[in-house]
Image (cartoon, rainbow, N blue to C red):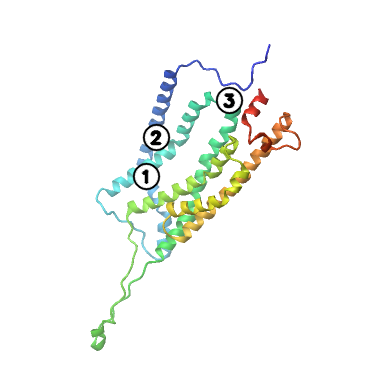
Amino acid sequence: MSDAPTDDIEDSSAPLIEHLAELRNRIIRSVMAFLVGMIIAFLVWNPIFNFLTDPICSQLNERGQDCGLILIKLQEGFFVAIRISLMGGFILAFPFISYQMWRFVAPGLYRSEKSAFLPFLIASPFMFLLGASFAFYIVIPLAFDFFLGFQQVGGVPVPLEGEVAATGDGLGNAGITFQGSVAEYLTLTIKFILAFGLCFQLPVLLSLMGKAGLVSSKGLGEMRKYAVVGILVLAALVTPPDVITQIILFVAVYGLYEISIQLVKRIERKRVEQLRREGVLGEDEDLDDLGGFADDDEDDAKA
């Protein structure tokens, strides 16, 4: 008589059609939550817009300029409000949507997989918020300060007399003043926030792949030179064509890559200690002696 395994998949006799019905119901709930969040964000879109325009207004005020963005098209203001509502609705509904995804996936996971996956599910929105905050409070002000530095204050024309009038030397310089479009500014700001928020997911992604045995710290270390090239290309694609912003994004993402290597090393050390306690590995053996992470061997040892 054998003992029942303690790490079995939760019992479920529901046929495929019931699983599809459950998926439909959770998608409907997620869409409804998104619509409710969108309506709430639409009701307060003006304060949200004022918050998003704070970086550009601060830079203009430091230069003694009024903060005013213009509407290029008549309907542009309405679509700006809709865009803000879409972004705000997704942010407000994201915790509920994540919960619905988790409730659908969780019954098909082992108990050990649940305990391993849940921290990454919590860390993902935190890292996105950290990246978005880094972009909004540090990168965006630096970028706008760089761009606004190309303005030129027009000179006061001097009355032309005699020979000066013939040469035109008394004319003032042409002024270059920022008069930004509302939609263009919002697009640029959201692009910054999304780019840094997604890039800050790198430690979560690589750590999860390391937990699953798809990557190793040794392999990530050997890929450093390729990672540098890839990050440089990414920085050139997702940021405006100014060197300062690209360097900031490169330093941030490469730093996260190095942090990811250390996190994967920590995961490997814990797995080695666990396998040694279970007798799968000897004191002088490492994961390489089992051909990598050896997830199947670890599951067999638990069973």
Question: Residue at left 44%, top 62%?
Answer: 145
For label 2, the SS is helix
Whether residues under marks 1 and 2 lie with C-beta atoms below 8 angstroms apart, the answer is no
Look at mark 1 in the image and give the residue it sits on: 84
Q: Nearer the viewer, residue 158 or 6?
A: 6
Q: Nearer the viewer, residue 119 or 5?
A: 5
As shown in the figure, which amino acid type bears the numbered disc 3?
Tyr
Look at mark 3 in the image and give the residue it sits on: 110
Circle 3 residues within 10 Å: few <14, some 14–19, many ≥20: some
Spatial CA distance of label 1 from label 2 is 13 Å
As shown in the figure, which amino acid type bears the numbered disc 1?
Ile
For label 1, the SS is helix
Spatial CA distance of label 3 from label 2 is 30 Å
Between disc 3 and disc 2, the foreground one is: 3
Dividing the picture into quarters, in which one does residue 81 lie? top left
| Quadrant assignment for the N terminus | top right
Between disc 1 and disc 3, the foreground one is: 3
Q: In this rendering, does residue 42 appear at all?
A: yes
Q: In this rendering, does residue 44 appear at all?
A: no
Tell me: residue 204, above or below residue 144: above
Question: On residue 34, which mark appears?
Answer: 2
Pick whichever of labels 1 and 2 is earlier in the sequence: 2
Question: On residue 246, which mark appears?
Answer: none
Spatial CA distance of label 1 from label 3 is 40 Å
Whether residues under marks 3 and 2 lie with C-beta atoms below 8 angstroms apart, the answer is no
Pick whichever of labels 1 and 3 is earlier in the sequence: 1
